[in-house]
Image (spheres, coloured by chain):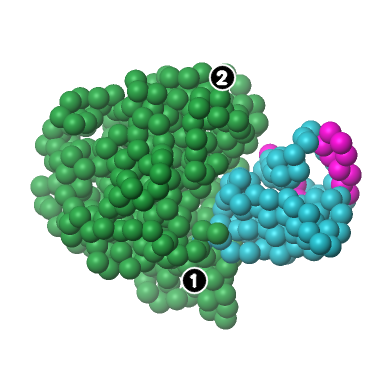
Amino acid sequence: MAKQAYQGPLEQIDECCWRIPKSYKEGMQVEGRIFADDRLVKQLRDDQAPEQVANVAFLPGIQEASLAMPDIHWGYGFCIGGVCATAPDEGGVISPGGVGYDINCGVRLVRTDLGADDVRPRISQLMAALFKQIPAGVGKGGPYLFGGKELDRLLTDGTRFLETKGLATIGDVEHTEAGGRLAEADPKAVSQKAKHRGSDQCGTLGSGNHFLEVQVVDEVFDQPAAQAMGLAEGMVAVMIHSGSRGLGYQVCDDALRDLRGVPARYGIHLPDRQLACAPVESPEGQAYLAAMRAAANFAWANRQLLMWQTRECFAEFFATSWESLKMNLVYDVAHNIAKIEEHTVEGKPKRVCVHRKGATRAFPPGHPELPDRYRRTGQPVIIPGDMGRASWVLVGQPGSMERTFGTTCHGAGRLMSRGEAIRRSKGRRIDQELAAAGVIARCRSWKGLAEEQPEAYKDVSLVVDVVHRAGLAKKVARLRPIGVVKG
Amino acid sequence: MFELFEHTADVGLRVRAGDLNRLFEDAAQALFSAILADPDSAKPVEEMVFNIEGTRYDDLLFDWLSELLFTFATRHVVFADFSVRVHKAGLAAIVRGEPIDPARHELGAEIKAITYHGLKVEQTADGWLAEVIVDV
């Protein structure tokens, strides 16, 4: 199935981009373009992800090209790292597979005034405190319960709702993508099943590749941008990677079920059932969009509450307020989402539906949607790495608007299957290996830790290198983990 | 009879059985062997009844596993055994399990959803084969 090697064409366009020509498969409306370099392109043929890039090119209303970022790997319908923009006014479609099951899986970075020397001597105790406070693990619920009308308000207003409850500051709202609130979300479009699944999960980490990390800023590459973000070498920061939990998974599941048989009704021929879609302007398309936005708002609320609990934990641990530690939100980005944005297509402004699946928005300096603090530097892009290696902060560059509908990569791609990772972990204590490398890992599942071992992932630094050279986003800082909480 | 197989970042369930009822039962066992680190840790203490509608076997399998997953996720229960009767309009099942006890039940992967990828239920020379990928 997916692990078969890709046999189709890959033509090099420039040092960072490869093309799958439109002629490859009958039905492709545009070509495919994959961002990679000589090192990463070797792995490109390992699975069917390039075939998926070609398949996405079939989607009605697709503009310019079917794109993929350098962390590309196989997914459902769309590959992870897949990006496509469709034009609603031209019958362009929206596809849940282009967003993913974990709607608005994303990541945020919180800076602090603490230095590595303040934290390292007590890192084990700090990680124990975080492990105790932060709800993590499979199906694990948390202390915040939202039901009925409150849940509907949360689904409608995301982080803004939490601000009215005193669980978010105006700074938190401003420094979250979309202000932590996608307009025109409709809680009525979210099924009771999805609400039930999410009711006790807002403010919980989940498991798998979700994490909460205590990190140290290792190296700064762009001083002015780092300064605007409040980052400096040696500074301790917290990175939180999580999504919309069971509510989002159920919204995607419901949408795929509701879309059974729908593409055919609109005369849409799909090379892969998992590209199930409907025109954006159709009732089915609008229903998914409204539900997806609600799930996205839930995810922003989730990360906000995870951050809030982290602030409370640090405050207690360091016996001072989080405000005096200046634990401010640097930024929060979504990397599984679809948004209606305006982009330039063939020289003219056009309203498009941009799908980013395992891909992050990367708006350049001057973009009107950026908060004041980042208007001159560009939008911060947070790239979570793996447990043992680095994470990155980048800023969006003009190249993203020119080449990828304002998008860049989201992290490292998986290299190894979970089974392979488990086999390779036999007889090993991954947590001890990490401790020896200076990372204190606390997890709720040993199996989960083994599956998420660093070697299971591509090297995120290679991925970041490509987007930097391709002009999509520029390196600002690299951070190294010193503590990890995993579910 | 079932096995779990690898599928890039996710997990595949492959089930073989002599008849359809057994196929659906073993598919449920396979699901819980992915959910629980030790599937035998679940005890058949309480009973629940499931009725699923559907005439296409692949969609029926999908909906059956989805219901089980949803119930696990919302009622915080794990299931130990399954008794399924597939009929003309769908299936009826009696499922036995218990509430999740963190002391005894180590949960494995967080399964987000059952997917349509490579979903199949087909007859073979000696019975039935089903394959389904779950998103982890």
Span highlighted in magenta in the image: B74-91
Observer able to see residue B84: yes
In space, the residues marked 1 and 2 are separated at their CA atoms by 44 Å
Instruction: Please state the total of marks drawn on the protein image.
Output: 2
Q: Quadrant of residue A201?
A: top right
Residue lying at 50% horizontally and 35% vertically, measured from the top left = A269
Eyeballing the image, is A32 above or below B8? above
Residue wearing tag 2? A188
Residue lying at 16% horizontally and 44% vertically, measured from the top left = A399
Q: Residue A237: which disc?
A: none
Residue lying at 49% horizontally and 64% vertically, measured from the top left = A4
Residue wearing tag 1? A431
Residue lying at 57% horizontally and 78% vertically, measured from the top left = A426
Which chain is displayed in green in the rendered image? Answer: A
Which chain is displayed in cyan in the rendered image? Answer: B
Asked which secondary structure carries label 1, the reply is: helix
The kind of residue tagged 1 is Asp
Asked which secondary structure carries label 2, the reply is: helix
Eyeballing the image, is A133 above or below A9? above
